[in-house]
Amino acid sequence: MSNPINKVQVICRIRPFLSHEKPDESVVIENETTIRVQNHRDPTKDVNFMFDACYSSKISQEEVYRSKIKELVESVFHGQSATIFCYGVTGAGKTFTIQGDDVNPGIIPRALNQIFANAKRNGGNSQIKISYYEVFKENLYDLLREGDNGPGLPIRVDANRKTFIAGLKEVLINSFDEFRRMYASSVKKRHTASTRLNKNSSRSHAVLVINISFIDRKTNKTIQGKLNLIDLAGSEDNRKTDNNRERMKESTAINQSLFVLGKVIEALNSGASRIPYRDSKMTRILQDSLGGGSKSMMIVNVAPGETFLPDTHKTLNYATKTKEVINKDPVIELVPQNQRIYNTSGHYTTVSNGTQQ
Ligand code: ADP
Ligand code: MG
C-alpha cells in the first residue's frame, strides 16, 4: 500500500500466547489489514479494527522487517528522516519488536546491520552517529552518559529554528559490533537508572537516534538522514493500580505524552493544518522526523487473550481510525442498520449487521 507523504503508517502486531497463558480466540487477525476483537462488554458482538497492515502471532521478526521496515530504513540513505514507534501495554511485545533478543533480533539490530551494509556499499565515506535518550515525566536523560544519569537535559532551538537536546551525547560508530557493545551497556544503564528514579523502564520512552551522513559521489553533495527507533512507555493506565501521589503524577505525565503523540499522528493523518507538536517534549524533539516529508510508522503491539481485552480495546481505539462492529449472531437484530459508532478520537464508521464492508 502506498503511503502519501506526511502520513504515519499504523500497523498492528499480535504476539503469541506465552507458555503460562491459556490460549483463547478472543483476539484474532482476520486478514492482512483487520484485527477482530471480542467485545468484552457485549459477547454478542466483535469489533473489527483496520490498520495499514496486521501481523499474526506467527509472523517472524525477519518478516516484519522485510515487509515494511527495510524500505523505511533505506529512505534514510536518500536524505530522509524516519521514525518508528512501538506502542502498547506492558507485556504486549514492544521491546521484542523494536529490540528483540539474541535469538530473535528485532528492528534495532536489523536496521543497524542494513545501515552498515549500505555504508560499506557507499565506499566507506559514511559517518554513523548514535544518540540514545530516555523521556521520563517530561524530563530527558542521556543513556550514553558515563556515570549517573545526571540532571534532565534542556531542549533548545538552534539558529535554523531546529529543536535539539542540549548536551546530548552523540557517538560515532564504526561497525555493527561496536554498536552492539555500546547498545548493550546503555540498555543495562537504562535499567539501573530506572531503579534510581524509582520506576521501571516500562514507564519511560526510550529513543535511539541514528544519524547518517555521507558524500554522494555523483553529486558531491553531503546527504544527511536520521532514524528514530522508539520503545514507548507502557500505555496502560497506571492510575488505577497506583494510589501513591508521586506515581499518580508520573502516570499523568506518561499518559499525557502518549495522548499528545496520538493527537499528532491523528492530525498528520487527517491533513490538519495545526499539528500539536509543542504539547509534549517528545513530539517537540521529533518534530523534524514526524510528518513534513518524513516516513513514520507506529507499530501497535497487542497481547492476545481475554485477560488483556479491556487494554486491547483501548490500545486499538487509540491507534485506529476505522473500526466496525460485527454482530456475531445474525438472529439478534437489535442494532439498527447504518448506526454510527464513535471511537474515542471522534471518528466514526458505519455499523453493518454481520456483513463486512
Ligand atoms: P513490552 O516491551 O511491550 O512490555 P515485551 O517485548 O517485553 O513486552 O514482551 C513480553 C513477553 O512476550 C516477552 O517475554 C517477549 O519475549 C514475549 N514476546 C513478545 N512478542 C513476541 C513474539 N512476537 N514472539 C514471541 N515472543 C514474544
Ligand atoms: Mg518493554
Image (tube, rainbow, N blue to C red):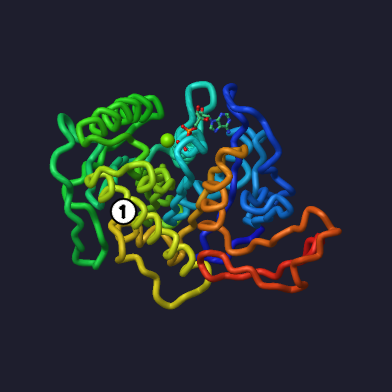
Ligand 2: give its quadrant.
top left
- Which one is in front, 252 or 332? 332
On the question of residue 134 being in view, the answer is yes
Residue name at image x 36 percent, y 30 percent:
179
If the image is split into quadrants, where does the N terminus sit?
A: bottom right
Q: Is residue 152 left or right of residue 258?
A: left
- Residue 100: image location, x then y, percent: 49, 30
Where is 174 relative to 73, above or below?
above
Task: Quadrant for the C terminus, please.
Answer: bottom right
Measuring from the top left, give residue 311's x and y in whole percent: 52, 47
User: Does 29 appear above or below 279?
Assistant: above
Q: From this viewpoint, which residue is outermost toward the right?
A: 331
Of residues 115 and 284, the one nearer the viewer is 284
Question: Do we see residue 114 in this rendering?
Answer: no
Which of the pair 6/282 is nearer the observer?
282
Q: Residue at x 61, y 39 (%)?
A: 306
Q: Which residue is mark 1?
A: 252
Query: Relative to the observer, which residue lies in front, 330 or 167?
Result: 330
Across and down, in percent, residue 109 comes to: 46, 32
Task: In the rendered view, tell whether residue 270 sits above or below residue 184.
Answer: below
